[in-house]
Each structure stands twice: as C-alpha cells, then as structure tokens.
Amino acid sequence: MARIRTAAYDDQREAILAQAAALFARQGYTATSMNQVAAACGISKPTLYHYVRDKHELLLLVAQAHIDRLQAVVAEVEAQALSPRERLQALIERFVLAYADAQHEHRVLTEDVKFLDESARQRVLDGERRVVAAFARAVVELRPELAGASLATPLTMLLFGMINWMFTWLKPGGALSHAAMAPVVVDLFLGGLGAVQVPISRLGKTKKETVA
Amino acid sequence: MARIRTAAYDDQREAILAQAAALFARQGYTATSMNQVAAACGISKPTLYHYVRDKHELLLLVAQAHIDRLQAVVAEVEAQALSPRERLQALIERFVLAYADAQHEHRVLTEDVKFLDESARQRVLDGERRVVAAFARAVVELRPELAGASLATPLTMLLFGMINWMFTWLKPGGALSHAAMAPVVVDLFLGGLGAVQVPISRLGKTKKETVA
DNA sequence: CCTACCGATCGGTAGG
DNA sequence: CCTACCGATCGGTAGG
C-alpha cells in the first residue's frame, strides 16, 4: 500500500486549521468564506478542498482538535497523584494556559458548535461533558455535600464560566497575563466553594426525589 | 404636527425585535436571513423593511435595547441605599434574573456585536463598560486593596463570566432555575473575594507604576 | 493547481 | 398626498 499522507500534507493541513480557526473566531463561521480561508493560507480554493471535504469538516476538525487537547490535559493531571484540592488547582491553571495558547480554537468551540450537524455536534459535546465531569469529580471530593444538593455540576459550570469568559476581555500581550490570572481564579473558586450555603430543602436531595 | 408612529407600529416593532433576537441567538446573525425574520413575524419582507432600515439596524436595536435594560437595572439598584455587600448582592441577583428573561437578547449581545459597524459597536461597548464599572465599584468598596493591585476589574470580569456563561448550560424550564442559582453565585463570589491573595509584587501597584 | 463557472440564495427595492 | 403593505425580481455573491 502506498502511503496516503506525507508529512508535508499534514503540516499544510495543520496550517489550514490554524488559519481557519483565526478567521472563524474573528468573523464567525457563517461569515467566513472558503475563499478567505484559501487566501489566508496562500492557496487556491480548489487546493483547499484537497485538504478538507467541505466547510463543515473544516469546522469539525478545528473543534475536535481543541477538545482533544483539553481531554489530554485532563488525562495528564489525573495521572498525577494529587489531592482533590491540588488536582482542581492544577486543572484550573492548565486550562487557563491552554486557552491562552488556543484562543481562536476556543472561541470556535464555544460559539460555532451550533453549525455542526447533529452527529458531529454530539461528538464534540461528549468531549466537553467528559472534561466538565473531571472538574466536577474534584469539586465533589472537596465538598461531598454539594453532590447531595445537586450543586457540584452547577458550581463547576460557574467555574467554567469564569475561565471560558476570560478570552473575551483578557487579550494576549496585555498588561495582565493569563498566567497571572490563574492563581486569582484558583483563590476565588476554592475560597468561594467553602462559602456556598446548601439550602436546607436541598440537603440530601437527588434529582429524582421530591420533598417529603 | 401629526403623530409619526402609532401604538400599533411600536408594538409590531417590538415583536419584530423579539423574533429577530430568537433567530439570531439560535442561528447566529449572519446565518439568519431577513426572509426568516419576516416569516417568523408573519409579515412579508417589504413590510419588515418598513419597520427597520436594514439588517444591521435590526441587530443594533436588539443589542441596544438589551444593554439599555441592564443599565436601567444598575440605576435602580444604585438608587437604593445599600451597603456595598448588599448592592453587589442585589446587582448579581437582578442580573441573573434579567438574563433569564432575555436569554436570546443576551446571546446576541455577547456573540453578534462583532457584526455591528464601528460606531454602533462602540455605543454598545460603552454601555457594557458602564455596567461593568458599576459592579467594579461595589467590588472595590468591599475590598479596596484589590483596586491598588489592579485586580478589581479582572475579578469583576470573572463574576460576569459566571453569570454570562449561565445561559449556555442553564435552560429555562429545567430542574434548576435561574432564581435558585442567584444565591449560589452570590455566595461563591462574595466568599471567594475574601480568599483572593494580593501578590506582594502588586501591592499598591497601579497600572502606570513600575516596581521600585 | 488555476480560471471559470454552476445552482441557490443573499440583502434590499422596484412598480402598483 | 399619506400609511401600510403585496408579488416579483433586482444586482451581487455565497459554497462548491
């Protein structure tokens, strides 16, 4: 069997994904034309279609590569023997830095997933759920009573809100760096976690129970 | 002088803005056609153009109306005689509820502002800055040393991240309501605020100072 | 790998 | 003359 892809092919494809991510992030998926992507890569549109089947595949490749990287970060941190607090701290710090290095891909992941078809979107959302679950496990280990009140995942989502939102106001190269913000996020979330009141009506309540 | 607009005209226009917000939120601004907006309103496209000059004006009206409502909420809360803690608590609770009632408009404000022309976008961003400044003032009054470390606005943005992100995972009509989440956000942020460490290198440091 | 195109659909407006 | 609309179609451009 002849080889299907050369190293140059893969490099070119990587470059195309990076350019596409930057354009999608700035203009949105729909407002970006395949002509623009080709021009940014210095290739013709027919050449672009040699590397990707269609515009949807381009979007899927950008989103999937990013969520794969995030899942790899989770796996790395979980492979270390850390206490729940250290693990959550490491996850937050690693994610803030990962977002700083992939701000375009991150914007695409959060804003353009709706343009994927059903099966592709489900694959991406599955990856996101796995990542959220890893954070939520650490939250539960830190404050088990929050799980009983069904508050562990909501609180984890508030944490994701903090770090997912950072790319809208924290620009790389500015006075304040992502690296400097990471410990602030850690302090705020871990400090606040101890202050969250569990409503009496929700104590020991699971999703399917009703109040006696 | 004859009246320019009838009450029916204003009502129809309000209905158009609501339908456009819902479509823009679900499909994005670019992917939504004026035909779809007209169809959702049960009117023809020429009739739609009787109420709005063009598609950009439609986007601006949706975004501006929402940011105006948020500024009105800020003004209402600031008109009350509240302690800094009570004021921040009230702002958080009111915003979470306001977002729950205007989830489509909120999504448009956060994702589609980039499609406005320069002057319109600046007007909307100015409104956003005013709102953020009101929250930041309350944060500074609660922990003045954060302002010296230039951390008050970053922390305020983390707070906005929590509540701005809620519309992505907290669906109206679900088991967990926005009203139930509001006090959780208050506890997490106010509790965490006391735990944020001010780096020694940033103590008393302002944006233009260098380390002595 | 390019120029040259296609079916369709876009935002916006004509006449009545 | 105004307003509030309609069916039909304009010039350009999208993805492919």
Image (spheres, coloured by chain):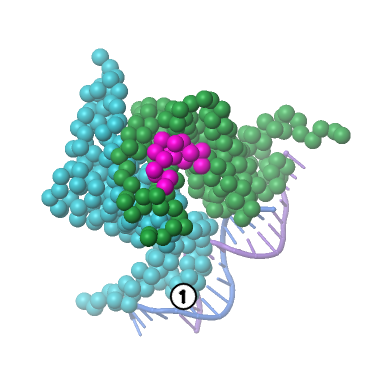
Chain colours: A green, B cyan, C purple, D blue
Residue A81 at what x, y percent from top left? 52, 25
Report the residue that reaches farthest toward the front: A212
Q: Which is more toward the observer, B130 or A116? A: A116
Which is the main secondary structure of the residues drawn in magenta? helix
Q: Quadrant of the C terminus of chain A?
A: bottom left
Report the residue that reaches farthest toward the right: A1
Name which residue lies at 28% across and 35% down.
B193
Name which residue lies at 29% across and 31% down.
B195
- The correct choice, above or below, for B91 with respect to D10 in the image is above
Quadrant location of residue A88? top left
Residue A63 at what x, y percent from top left? 58, 43
The answer to whether one can see residue B165 in this image is: no
Residue A36 at what x, y percent from top left? 59, 44
Q: How many marks?
A: 1
The answer to whether one can see residue A131 in this image is: yes
Label 1 residue SS:
loop
Residue A135: in magenta span:
yes
Name which residue lies at 37% across and 44% down.
B162
Residue B89: in magenta span:
no
Tell whether A132 sits left or right of A175.
right
Q: Which residues are magenta?
A: A133-148
Tell whether A32 sits left or right of B72.
right
Name which residue lies at 72% across and 33% down.
A9
Check the residue under mark 1 and report the chain it is in: B
Look at label 1 and name its amino acid. Ile
Tell whether B41 sits left or right of B188.
right
Circle 1 crowding by C-alpha within 10 Å: few under 14, some 14–19, many from 20:
few
Residue B120 at what x, y percent from top left? 35, 52
Q: Which residue is mark 1?
A: B43
Q: Which is more toward the observer, A49 or B197? A: B197
Report the residue that reaches farthest toward the left: B81
- The correct choice, above or below, for A126 with respect to B47 in the image is above
